[in-house]
Image (spheres, rainbow, N blue to C red):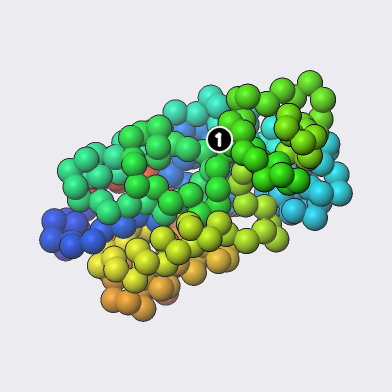
Amino acid sequence: MISIPEEVLNLLQHSRFPVAFTGAGISVESGIPPFRGPGGIWNKYDPEILDISYFLKYPEESWKQIRKMFYEVIEKARPNPAHYALAEMENQGRLKGIITQNIDNLHQKAGNKKVVEYHGNTRDVVCLECGKKYPLLQISFEQLPPRCPQCGGLLKPDFVFFGEPIPADAALQAEEWMKNTDLLLVIGTSGVVVPASLLPYTAKQYGAKIVEVNLYPSEYTNRISDYFLQGKASEILPALI
Ligand code: APR
């Protein structure tokens, strides 16, 4: 049985503006491998595949890899108890929102409404010529790379590649929540990819308490985490909520 320190339960109980910041670790038990650490995607694939300059140079190859790396895995994935715990917390009016680095749409599938997708999502694709967005499921992959039905332009997954900016609305909303939160749950993230990984430091600067949930220590653990709940998110979060 997971034991949660009394102070953490108190913090949760009395928090005025709790926010969650999630990374790949929260979806590992939904069958989606993390990027780093044991079983990490970057142990098998070269991160260059997700670099925007590589995509523009080799769109066909990039699409082939991305479909294997993400789409095949994500379409089979279902929310796990960690996702449902955060949805329950929002239902109880005790979670102001989630900022996720994940592109797997599992927070929304679990029922959360207030989700900032800091790295975009895999639900849609966007035309690099005319900017039109299409649901991924509408696009045929007979020919690679997929082309815009409207203008024939190159279609790109609607998630943020390395070298691309964070969507402005996501960045603004995340910044605002980091300046207002008094309790930030940092869940399943190694804290190494900027600018996303800087968000918890902003929350700390503005006086938030940081409760970290991770299987292993992260960049945050000995720097800004006030509490480090070590273990699987799918066991710890239900115990927290
Ligand atoms: N429960 C909780 N934490 C877990 C679990 C689990 N079951 N399994 C793994 N973890 C933790 C790992 O210890 C690690 O700290 O989840 C974290 C996963 O780290 P990363 O794979 O680096 O994922 P993330 O931090 O989300 O990566 C950030 O990097 O490649 C880019 O854009 C990509 O959004 C991603 C960004």
Q: What amino acid is found at the position of numbered circle 1 in the picture?
A: Arg
Left or right, 49 with respect to 71, comes to: right
On the image, the x and y values in percent for residue 203 come to 36, 70
Q: Nearer the viewer, residue 122 or 133?
A: 133
Other residues around mark 1 within 10 Å, as few (<14) / some (14–19) / many (≥20): some
Left or right, 197 with respect to 178, comes to: right
Picture residue at 61% right of the left edge, 46% below the top:
159
Q: Which of 1 and 65 is in front in this view?
A: 65
On the image, the x and y values in percent for residue 80 come to 38, 33
Q: In which quarter of the image is residue 67?
A: top right
Is 27 rendered above or below residue 74? Answer: below
Q: Quadrant of residue 91?
A: top left
On the image, the x and y values in percent for residue 11 come to 18, 62
Is 61 rendered above or below residue 214? Answer: above
Can see residue 48?
yes
Picture residue at 48% right of the left edge, 57% below the top:
170
* Residue that protrudes farthest toward the right in the picture: 57
Can see residue 234?
no
* Tag 1 residue: 123
Is 76 rendered above or below residue 99? Answer: above
